[in-house]
Amino acid sequence: MLKRIYQIALRECGILVKNPIYGFCMVIFPIITIFFFTSLMNDGLPTDMPVGVVDQDNTSTSRELTKRLDSYQMSHVVAHYPNMNEARQAIQQNEIYAFLLIPKGTTEQLVSSHQPKISFYYSNTTLVAGSMLFKDLKTIAALGSAGAISARMSAMGKTENEISAFLQPIKVDLHMINNPWTNYNIYLSSMIVPGVFFLFVFLITAYSLGTELKFKESKKWLKLAENNIVVALTGKFLPQTLIFLSIFYSFELYTYYYLGFPHPGGIVPILLLGLLTVLSGQAFGIFIFGLVPSLRMSMSVCSLWGVLSFTTSGATYPLFSMNPMLEAVAQLFPLRHYYMIYQMCIFNGYPLVNAWFNILALFIFIALPFFINRKLKHAMLTYVYIP
């Protein structure tokens, strides 16, 4: 049996070398994906996002607010507009992401102990930019009122400690777990790259089986395995498994140990998750081809499954807030279980037993080909390729 697996693996190595699609989809494109996404968000957070100001008050106080807004790392005041309509048009034309409106008489109302109203408008079409600028604009609004109150209390003879206690009676000490830098690269690259990797594994697996039928090599392939479909699959996908494992482990080594992504869980969950990722992706591709033994249809299903994985993983929107039926369907996507194991055992450092359900789910994905072995063997022996 080992000799037959070795012969089939050598045959597969020859196929991998001759067909450039394998080299591109298994090595070159995954490496490009890794460096593209990790370098795209290398700074962690977007900086100097364009903001506008409508300063109808035009006083030293309003100019100070504008100056403070421009001094923030994420905000950069690029334009002043005479009225709200022009600022709104600038947002619609994607010239700015937000603008601050300071009405006429704001400073006068502050001095006279009235409650002036300033407004800020932001676009959440670009989600990260909108949420970041919202925080800056809200801070500016709070600082404007705090500055006036501080000046009045100081004139009344209050000390700095009394003024601080009045303005901020409760001081918030904020700690982001394992990511105090608020580095979005840690959050997003850790999910986008594995999601794309799953997609490549799905497609290459289905493509490998489909080309056996397309080029009428399936019977020769099974003959090398003496018609044992398990031996045939093992020998065929062993070289691909080793290549995919090398690429994925390189990605984990690069992100966790070179870029310094937090991984308090240690090396064992990292290695285990890499192995489960590759094997479950390949098993799922084999399973889909066994259900739909057609090169075109199986690759279409794998593409659809890979793209939908990003939505159902729960990385960008919590799964428990979705429709209960979608929450149940999400368990059918390997990326969902990858994400749960990653966040529990690698990012937060909890024991592997806490993710037992998700580990079991990936093992079930790995076992899926055993349910379609007979149908897959029948397809390889009798089906005729239809373009």
Image: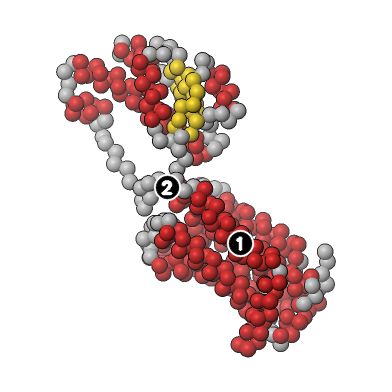
The image position of residue 374, as x and y in percent, is 71, 78
**In this orientation, which residue lies closer to the viewer: 121 or 87?**
87
At a point 22% along the width and 19% down the height, the residue shown is 153
Left/right placement of residue 323 relative to residue 260 reads: right
Left/right placement of residue 359 relative to residue 181 reads: right
Left/right placement of residue 230 relative to residue 78 reads: right
2 or 1: tag closer to the N-terminus: 1
Nearer the observer, disc 2 or disc 1?
1
> Badge 2: how crowded within 10 Å, few (<14), some, or many (20+)?
some
The label shown at residue 12 is none
Q: How many marks?
A: 2
The image position of residue 164, as x and y in percent, is 23, 28
The label shown at residue 28 is 1
| Secondary structure state at the residue bearing disc 2 | loop
Q: Are marks 2 and 1 in contact (CB under 8 Å)?
A: no
Q: Is residue 318 visible?
A: no
| Secondary structure state at the residue bearing disc 1 | helix
126 lies above or below 88 = below
At a point 33% along the width and 15% down the height, the residue shown is 110
> Badge 1: how crowded within 10 Å, few (<14), some, or many (20+)?
few
**In this orientation, which residue lies closer to the viewer: 157 or 47?**
47
The image position of residue 163, as x and y in percent, is 21, 25
167 lies above or below 182 = above
Check disc 2 and report the residue beneath it: 183
The three-letter code of the residue at mark 1 reads Ile
At a point 61% along the width and 69% down the height, the residue shown is 282
At a point 61% along the width and 72% down the height, the residue shown is 240
